[in-house]
Image (cartoon, rainbow, N blue to C red):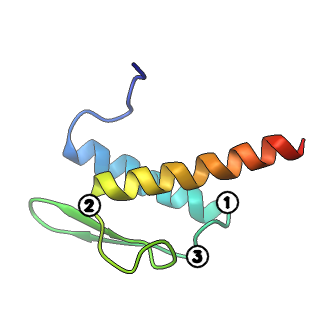
Amino acid sequence: MKNMPFHDEITLAEQTEGLAKQAMQLGLIPSFTVHHFPDSWQFYLPNLNPELLTPEEAYLRLQRLIESRNSTARSIL
């Protein structure tokens, strides 16, 4: 099993925010918004999904997006 860089909901949300920043730097998304609540975070990725996402949903979507970009870049080389 892969070692995941998160261990609880807070670290998952922090890793998701990091993936969103990485996706922005790669030009895959133009922006993102994080709504911080006392007990949870919600992510808004306007070009991927018009609805608010949980950290889990946003993490998986961003991870797939970045991985697909990386695999496309490798196939070109």
Cα distance in 3D space between marks 1 and 2: 22 Å
Quadrant where the C terminus sits is top right
Residue located at (41% from left, 50% from top): 60
Label 2, label 3: how many angstroms apart (C-alpha)? 19 Å
* Residue 26: quarter of image: bottom right
Say above or below: 43 vs 18: below
Percent across and percent down for residue 49 are: 42, 74
| Residue type marked 2 | Thr
State if disc 2 and disc 1 touch (CB < 8 Å).
no
Residue identifier under label 2: 54
Question: Residue 38's quadrant in the figure?
Answer: bottom left
Q: Quadrant of residue 74?
A: top right
On the image, numbered disc 1 is attached to which residue? 26
Q: Nearer the viewer, mark 2 or mark 3?
A: 2
Left of 50 or right of it: where is 37?
Answer: left
* Residue 27 location (% of width, % of height): 67, 67
Q: Report x, y in % for residue 75.
A: 83, 42
In this rendering, position of residue 62 left or right of residue 77:
left
Residue occupying image coordinates x 51% and y 77%: 47
Task: Name the N-terminal-most of marks 2 and 3.
Answer: 3
Q: For mark 3, what is the residue?
A: 30
- Label 2, secondary structure: give it: loop
Amino acid type at image mark 1: Leu
Q: Counting residues from the N terminus, which is met first, the one under dot 1 or under dot 2?
A: 1
